[in-house]
Amino acid sequence: MFEKGNFSWSAGALILSLLAAAPLFAIAVMALQSSGDTWPHLIENVLPGAVRRTLILMAGVAAIALVTGTGTAWLVTMYRFPGRGLFQWLLLLPLAMPTYIIAFCYIELFDYSGEVQTALRNLFGWQSARDYWFPDIRTLTGAIFVMGAVLYPYVYITARASFVAQSICVIEASRTLGRSAAETFWQIALPLARPALAAGTALALMETLNDIGAVEFFGVRTLTVTVYDTWLDRGSLAGAAQISCVMLLFVLAVLGLERGLRSGKRFHHTTGKYRDLPESRLTGWKAGFATLACALPILIGFVLPTYVLAGDAIVHLASGLTEDFWRAAMHSLTLSLAAAVLGVIFAVVLAYGRRQTQSKLVHIASFVPAVSYAVPGTVLAIGILIPLAGLDNTIDDAARSLFGVSTGLILSGSAFAIVVAYTIRFLAASLGSVEAGLSKITRNIDAAGRTLGASVTQMLWRVHLPLLRPTLGAAALLVFVDSMKELPATLLLRPFNFDTLATQVFTLASLYRYEEAGLSALTIVLVSLVPVLFLHGIIARSRPGTSASRVHTTGTKEELALPIS
């Protein structure tokens, strides 16, 4: 039996977990309903191509992210070369560049009317596209290249954390036994880092599956675009829910593959000895190659897109600061703040409820929000709309019966639905931060407080929350920035004539008004830089030689806590 306070927190955690799972149940129920001739048409004409393109896109992005993220992480961790200190944090910068923003930047830069092709025509006197050949950026290959350029930091973060945690003695033993640097990497460091690489790649794949803006700009009809078109263009919510179930199978496959690569692997480090390798300094062409290898991802994933955005923003600054821009900025700010507050409150209830109970049901249910982050925004939007629309209809029927008036779409037709989507989608980010903070507070404090007569709730207000202030701030920041960037769910749930900065960028870019979208896009990128710089501070404190870097991985769990959203 639980004490009253414990029961209340456990019940609260259980209810919030069920609310987070409600969209998934709603999608399953809606998918069982008839969609008329929509589903047969989709199976025959749409889904095969969409599934094929989605698989190719995910495989291509995973390959680029793995090679770029792992290679650069190994270089900056194990070698010394010109610019290494800067590259350690500059390699994180593409995280601040949403995929839909970098997509339209590269289209603006390399399309037929873009700066590059225009400069080539002026330089060589070419008159039309028939006079020369230039790779088409609006292809599946272009989408793979561009999305891989901004998603590799997910692998870079986890790979570097793993390399930092590996014992130097293991590396030295390998070198003493005659292994070359390349053999040490392939035979020792890479196998030890496999769980971390699987986790980082899974995050990159989730972002790829969630994307709707970049693939739309490149003309790649993935499953996400198919859900969007089926709902809005064909008017079939049941058909969209059925495609969403196919996407959920992709999510489960990615999570299962990631879990399979991590499970059953027990890696033990032999010592806590951390220092630089004496032979790790690169000179000559090797140093130049390492510098170039680290500089290119930054150039492609951040510098070039920022150059395009800054140029557009400066040229159109006066005309860009319109009432529409300020209204969209205010909408983004308000929605993101609301989601950040709710996300932190929900995370505290879930984490504290799990801390105060030994119930297996509560512990299992509290992991449900983590799955919500893996669910694409388009799928989550459908799952949220269905129960909210049902609740709206119930309220409307009651108002008509009692008062003879129609209330309309109070919940599903307002910004409330967007806030709910943001909160559920990014609850995993805030929950991870709060749980990491609570884990550092010894349970002896709880026991001491209870001995002095404090209740569970009083302990939270008087002890835990004051100690968790930095953690709560970090959690709110993560949810706020992710909400500012969110596009798929916002597109599907926004009320009529309601724009955020993200949807404004998407709308203007869809109308080929790239220059006008620059100011809104640059604003999103600048806001997104804040958590990236914060993350740099976390990694900097984890460098070899510091106490924070003495992290051991046992089994399948990396114990280095990083706020990866």
Image (spheres, rainbow, N blue to C red):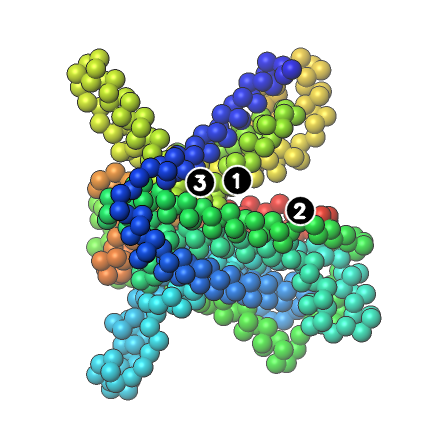
The answer to whether residue 19 shows anywhere in this view is yes
Find out whether the residues at labels 2 and 1 contact each other: C-beta distance under 8 Å.
no
530 lies left or right of 313: right
Q: Where is residue 408 in the image (x, y as percent from the top left)?
A: 22, 27
Residue 510 location (% of width, % of height): 26, 57
Report the residue marked by disc 2.
557
Kind of residue indicated by mark 1: Ala
Q: Which of 233 and 432 is in front in this view?
A: 233
The residue sitting at the left extreme is 404
Residue 460 x, y percent position in the rendering? 59, 23
Badge 3: residue crowd in 10 Å (few <14, some 14–19, many ≥20): many
- Image point (24%, 83%), residue name: 130
| Residue found farthest to the bottom | 124
Q: Which residue is drawn at 58% across and 52% down?
A: 258
- Residue at 33% across / 30% down in the picture? 388
- Callout 3: SS: helix
Q: What residue type is labelled 2?
A: Lys
Residue bearing mark 3: 425
Q: Mark 1 points at which residue?
A: 370
Dots 3, 1 in contact, CB < 8 A: no
Q: What residue type is labelled 3?
A: Arg
- For residue 173, the mark is none
User: What is the CA distance from the residue labelled 2 to the residue labelled 1?
Assistant: 16 Å
Residue nearest the viewer, comparing 396 with 156: 396
